[in-house]
Image (cartoon, rainbow, N blue to C red):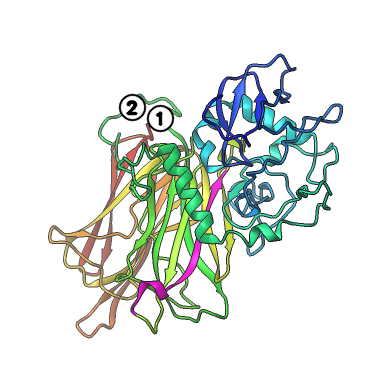
Amino acid sequence: MHGFPANKHILHTPYAGILFCHRLPYPLALRPAPAAAGHLRPAPAAAGHLRPAPAAAGRPPPLARAAGRPPASLRPRPCHPPTPCAHGQDGDFGPTKGTKPRGAPFLGFSSLSWLLSARFPELQAMDLEAKLGENGHGHKGSDLDPEKAAGQVLQGGDAKRPREADNGDHRSAMETDEEEDEELGPESCFELHRKSWLSMFGRNGAIPFEAETQYPPMRRTDIPVPPVTGSGSGDTMEVFFVKVTQITSDLQWPLDVYGIVAVRDSLDWKRNYLFSRGRDNRQTLTSQDCLLELTGPSGSILLWDEPVFEIDLKVKDKGSSLPEDDKILCLDFFGYNNISYRGSLSYTRTEVLSSKHSTVEVRYAHVKRSVEATITARISKGSGNFSARLTACNTSIGEDVVLLDTRGKEVFVNEDGEVTLQRRVVVVEERAELILGIKAEQLGDTGESSTKLEKKFGFVAKSALRNQGYFHIGSSSLHMVVAWSVLL
């Protein structure tokens, strides 16, 4: 191969092409080999290349440490695999809330292998076989179940893993690359992630890193598909909330927060924004109210390949008007390895991101064989002189997505009578129901509550067309419309 730096590893595999290794953010050249199926064998090293050390009998050879090996802060962070809850339906399959478990073997992909790894499932299977042959301490593993690899996470934060010292001495498995972690802060890690994305999908600068996905919802609402079970459905992701659970002593509540939270999927690899606020449109967070007001996604998040979350949040400095004086609240990225999950049930998980200034939790769900539901609300009678909290719930998960929360204030109504929702796109399993709920209070001239309403109604998921229903709050009627669409 020409054009690659001299510190790249050349591996024999049964497939030709380029694969981005899940541990290294640079390419590996792949060419056909006579080696036995399922084993990777290093090719003869050309001048200036590193030759991997010989492997022990019966074990695949480890990759040799190259001079340009990425620092520890770029290596994937291990995460325990999901474990089904006792009910077998909804609940936490991921890491325990508030903790970051260590020691499970990582089977995810780097941000540069999003497309290629999914296009070559045989390579992923070989990688799994190779990792089953050894655990994190270099001993042969005998009790690692491939099913336990499901749902593990690729993280852009500070990963800790064993390494081989440059002087030939071997460190113990508990020692880490502390000196390398000090080399790169969150800004440098995120900048390398940005450059990686641009090199893969930026088309030589034609597509900016901040570009928003152009795929709208309701793409198949008015184009019915044949009534075949599973036609056009697929796995999707539902994001429930993003919240700041802890801050360090150099920050104080309340926080004036701005920035972005976005997720990329393989539909076009552009950002699908969940939260986006400028410095002049900050959200104030308190210790009692620390949830970000999500306004996305603009369309369903597809789980064809591994999606990647990006979080870039800052806190405005209260004593300065200069953006340079603002502090980073959270600057990180992580991926969800949905490809490894082969279960038949939807499940939820919470990703915990710990950084220098804060701890942030992201709650989301892997929704199996689902369709898209786009929800709109309109005042059909009376006025909008009421406060409301609207929610949507997929019965296969049992957890609410907040569509609107006016927090005691009147709902905002456009000139045509449409009520502006904070979020309007959710996903529902094809055999489940969508439950819409409301808690509303009609407000009098003095702001005192005169009428209260708490009600729910549901619809069975469909592949196209619409459902509608009404909430009656005193003299006002709120017309709810659900537009269904398959994903393709």
Q: Is residue 121 left or right of residue 63?
A: left
Closer to the camera: disc 2 or disc 1? 1
Q: Amino acid at mark 2?
A: Val
The residue that disc 2 covers is 225
Most foreground residue, 362 or 34 = 34
Q: Residue furthest front?
A: 47
State whether residue 93 is above or below residue 382: above
Most foreground residue, 331 or 221 = 331
Q: CA distance from mark 2 to mark 1?
A: 8 Å
What secondary structure prevails in the magenta region? strand
Residue 332 appears in the rendering = no
Look at the numbered discs 2 and 1 and tell me whether their residues touch, using CB distance below 8 Å: yes
Q: Residue furthest left?
A: 415
The label shown at residue 232 is 1
Q: Quadrant of residue 146?
A: top right
x and y percentages locating residue 451 in the rendered image: 29, 74
Residue at figure coordinates x 83%, y 42% from the top left: 138
Give the secondary structure at mark 1. Answer: loop
Residue 47 appears in the rendering = yes
Give, as a single range, the part of the protein colored magenta: 321-336
Give the secondary structure at mark 2. Answer: loop
x and y percentages locating residue 65 in the rendered image: 71, 41
